[in-house]
Image (spheres, grey):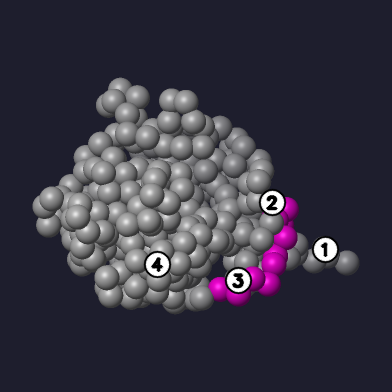
Amino acid sequence: MPRSPQPHIESLTAEAGESHAGLRLDRFLSESLPQLSRTRVQALIKDGRVASGGATIEDVTYRVKPGERFEITVPAAAETALKPEAIPLNVVYEDDALIVIDKPAGLVVHPGAGQPAGTLVNALIAHCGKSLSGIGGVARPGIVHRLDKDTSGLMVVAKTDQAHRGLAAQFADHGRTGELERGYLALVWGVPRKPHGRVDAPVGRHPTSRTKMAVLPEDKGRRAVTSWRVVETYGRSKNGAVASLLACRLETGRTHQVRVHLAHIGHPLIGDSLYGSGFKSKLKKLPQGAQATLAKLNRQALHAERLAFLHPVTGTLLEFNSPLPDDLAEIVHTLAEL
């Protein structure tokens, strides 16, 4: 009896034209087959799954010749070692290529040494099920950007190689030449002297504390730019207004960028124990009721309230906005009554 075809095996072909002459094979295939990332293509070549004229090609640097036709055998994505967990998700938008969620504060994005389970990735594996494609050959969600554990708000996650590749390119560009926009609402101590501003200060690992980031000299940090404007100011004291609500826009995407930059200009986030020293002394300047409300906040007052990007498959501009979550809305209400 003839052997049954292996399940879930996909066969793809790509033919080189005159304009492709001399291109590396991995580059040619990844550009010709946008559903596959270049990393995925390289792995397939090295695994002996690319052939031309009946001959297997295992050299990723092989130079393509016009008229060559390549056959690529793509196996099913390997099962991830991460376990699905039925963690509720606030899904804002979803299609076959991507999913946009409104992440609550307290949810870690990806498993790590200190958080092996109970993460957004575990929840996504459970939620997406069989619709999840093989990013890099492994069935797992494509995380193209992150939010800190205690930062709430909008995140987009890729479900296919093609979406992962397209989204990653937009986030790497940080909206300099495209439609990507990442906006945050931040509750900070004090009021900036100007109604708006721009922090252009390199960020890198803190020289003495490995859990922190810091503004560093240009030769030691990576360029980081945050634009901000004052939305509201709250309360009065002998030293001026107590707090402000700022709208921030990222022009780069460094770890803890907004938190570090706002602390750098003297207006740390309310509730930020890592970058906002003197929280208790600031609380003492407030009325008793306000002290009690702010003392309940167990995270930095930062919310990713806006996300806009081009759909990596259709090219459609997608725009999403998220209101302040209840804990931060309660802080705003309390501050507004000062």
Q: Dot 2: few (<14), some (14–19), or many (≥20) neighbours within 10 Å?
A: few
Identify the mark nearer the N-term, 2 or 1. Answer: 1
Q: Nearer the viewer, mark 3 or mark 4?
A: 4
Residue type highlighted by circle 2: Pro
In primary-sequence order, the first of circles 3 and 4 is 3
> Which residue lies under the disc numbered 2?
116
Task: State the count of labels.
Answer: 4
The magenta segment is 74-89
Marks 3/1: CA distance? 32 Å
Q: Please, is residue 253 above or below residue 109 in the view?
A: above
Classed neighbour count for the residue bearing mark 3: other residues with Cα under 10 Å, few (<14), some (14–19), many (≥20): some
Q: Mark 2 to mark 4: distance in Å?
A: 40 Å
**Dominant secondary structure of the residues highlighted in magenta in the image:** loop
Q: Earlier in the sequence, mark 3 or mark 1?
A: 1
For the residues marked 1 and 4, what is the alpha-carbon distance in whole angstroms?
78 Å
Could you tell me the amino acid type at mark 1?
Answer: Arg
Q: Is residue 248 left or right of residue 279?
A: left
